[in-house]
Image: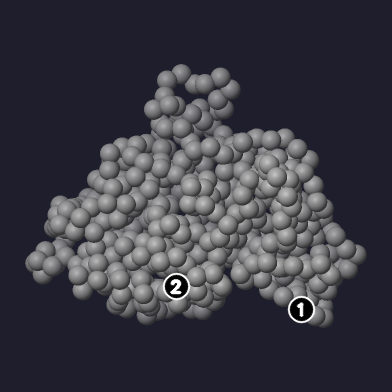
């Protein structure tokens, strides 16, 4: 980590090759993720996106994308006020969301789904899908945001293994249907008067997370029969193996290559590690009193089964980590902690294949049992540029608690995990969890581009962008996390 930290000083944003031991100072221009273009045709190297009438074909680890159609004759300036899908059987999926063509268009209205559970055949009631998702995005003007592949989207909703779906999207102002039954944390009530326009190209995305990706060693040797070739001439297996090795190598200073987790360290061990990694950058006072929390256990991308061939192969770094933004995923709370690897794979696939991002947006994820997971690839100790807080992704990290916390209280284990993680990660960069810092806005709905904004070192998403995230019940616990993180640092 010493080489990465030293070389990154004075570099606002470095885009580097995702190869083992490649220093981040070597800059390159990011290119589209391999297979991203093929995703629109229903044939990719990392599990297909099946479109139009192909939803009757079950492909494990795939996204089935279905166009929504008008449900009523009510129209506003030629656009239907309500679109959806009638109840139908579909291939297995566990996560659902809605996307549309223009990433700058907002969906003003209500999105609801019903799903049928595999095994029991029981249909759920109507469940609300969080519609405001544009605040979780890459900063304006970045390569990721301007890739041409990004779509507008709702948040994804975890529904468990399902094989049937019904959906409706109702424009704001359209008359509510008589059987409206929202059942969600942040559902917006239908208004009155003229209905708002719905975005063009609405599609329902049904995501099957599939099994965990095989270990890199399982992909070596001769290509398997039917292994697809990528645009660079590699087989899909070779691409997955090389990308997995690169993602693991980014954590090589903390854990062996291919490790499923980065183990927890005691305080004394963590302080020795800090001195070994960036001792040349520390002042004498910092050497004497490092103010860093013990390193927590972190499940790696290998641990939750990321298919590394899905993402953009290069990593992007900023200068340092000055602040942490706390989020919720708005995926609902109906998950078991044993399902979390599958849930994260679903979010990852939705972010990359459905929304067009270069990788999962969050730097870290936390479940309600207090487990911490590596998010965007590039190394958990490094300042990886995420896509979590539009306008403030540089020099920050995003921590997403899995679930919806508008009215549901987060678990004590989740809040403690936020504290442990921030005490360690912010401590690597000398940041005080109880302190304030300045971040320069890249543009958003609260602060103009270029404005230096004074923020808490540990902030909620809503502090940097006008949003309900991370939900009121989680937001009100951030003060508790700040205090605990400071104690872990010995402050």
Position in image of residue 74 (x %, y %): 88, 68
Asked which colour scheme the image uses, the reply is one colour
Q: What is the x, y in percent for residue 296?
A: 30, 55
Q: List x then y, in percent, for residue 43.
A: 64, 35
* Residue behind mark 2: 460
Mark 2 touching mark 1, by CB under 8 A? no
* Dot placed on the residue nearer the N-terminal end, 2 or 1: 1
Query: Which residue is at 40% across, 66% downward?
Result: 412
Looking at the image, residue 386 sits to the left or right of residue 293; the answer is right
In this orientation, which residue lies closer to the viewer: 218 or 445? 218
- Whether residue 179 appears in this view of the structure is yes
Q: In the current view of this chain or complex, which residue is farthest to the right?
A: 73
Return the residue nearer the eye: 130 or 277.
130
Q: Is residue 190 left or right of residue 158?
A: right
Residue matched to label 1:
191
| Neighbour tally class for label 2: few under 14, some 14-19, many 20 plus, Cα within 10 Å | many
Residue visible at 44% across and 44% down in the picture? 304
- Relative to 383, is 95 on the left or the right? right
The local secondary structure at tag 2 comes to strand
User: Which quadrant would the C terminus be assigned to in this image?
Assistant: bottom left
Q: How many marks?
A: 2
Residue found 63% across the figure and 59% down from its top: 153
State whether residue 38 is above or below residue 99.
above
Element assignment for label 1: loop
Crowding at dot 1, Cα within 10 Å, few <14 / some 14-19 / many 20+, comes out as some
Q: CA distance from mark 2 to mark 1?
A: 29 Å
């Amino acid at each position: 980590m010493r080489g990465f930290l030293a070389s990154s000083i004075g570099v606002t944003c470095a885009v580097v090759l995702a190869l083992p031991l490649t220093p981040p100072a070597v800059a390159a221009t990011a290119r589209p993720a391999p297979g991203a273009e093929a995703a629109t045709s229903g044939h990719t190297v990392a599990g297909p996106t099946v479109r139009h009438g192909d939803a009757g074909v079950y492909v494990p680890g795939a996204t089935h994308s279905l166009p929504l159609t008008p449900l009523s004759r009510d129209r506003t300036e030629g656009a239907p006020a309500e679109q959806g899908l009638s109840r139908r059987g579909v291939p297995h999926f566990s996560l659902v969301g809605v996307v549309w063509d223009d990433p700058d268009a907002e969906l003003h209205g209500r999105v609801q789904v019903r799903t049928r559970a595999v095994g029991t055949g029981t249909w759920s009631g109507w469940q609300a899908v969080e519609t405001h998702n544009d605040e979780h995005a890459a900063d304006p003007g970045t390569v990721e945001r301007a890739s041409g592949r990004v779509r507008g989207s709702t948040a994804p909703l975890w529904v468990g293994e399902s094989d049937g779906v019904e959906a409706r999207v109702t424009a704001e102002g359209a008359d509510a249907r008589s059987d409206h039954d929202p059942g969600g944390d942040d559902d917006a009530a239908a208004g009155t008067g003229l209905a708002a326009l719905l975005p063009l190209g609405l599609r329902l995305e049904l995501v099957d997370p599939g099994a965990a990706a095989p270990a890199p060693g399982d992909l070596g040797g001769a290509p398997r029969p039917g292994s697809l070739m990528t645009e660079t001439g590699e087989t899909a297996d070779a691409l997955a193996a090389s990308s997995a090795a690169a993602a693991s190598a980014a954590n090589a200073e903390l854990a062996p290559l291919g490790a499923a987790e980065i183990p927890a360290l005691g305080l004394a061990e963590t302080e020795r590690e800090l001195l070994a990694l960036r001792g040349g950058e520390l002042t004498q006072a910092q050497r004497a009193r490092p103010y860093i929390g013990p390193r927590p256990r972190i499940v790696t991308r290998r641990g939750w089964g990321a298919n590394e061939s899905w993402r953009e192969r290069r990593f992007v770094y900023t200068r340092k980590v000055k602040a942490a933004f706390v989020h919720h995923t708005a995926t609902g709370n109906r998950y078991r902690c044993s399902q979390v690897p599958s849930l994260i794979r679903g979010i990852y696939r939705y972010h990359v294949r459905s929304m067009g991002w270069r990788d999962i947006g969050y730097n870290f994820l936390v479940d309600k049992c207090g487990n911490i997971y590596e998010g965007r690839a590039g190394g958990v100790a490094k300042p990886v540029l995420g896509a979590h807080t539009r306008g403030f992704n540089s020099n920050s990290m995003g921590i997403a608690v899995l679930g919806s916390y508008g009215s549901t209280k987060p678990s004590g284990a989740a809040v403690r995990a936020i504290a442990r993680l921030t005490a360690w990660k912010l401590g690597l960069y000398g940041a005080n969890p109880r302190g304030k810092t300045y971040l320069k806005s890249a543009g958003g709905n609260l602060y103009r581009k270029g404005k230096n904004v004074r923020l808490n070192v540990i902030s909620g998403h809503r502090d940097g962008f006008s949003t309900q995230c991370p939900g009121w019940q989680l937001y009100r616990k951030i003060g508790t996390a700040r205090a605990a993180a400071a104690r872990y640092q010995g402050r």
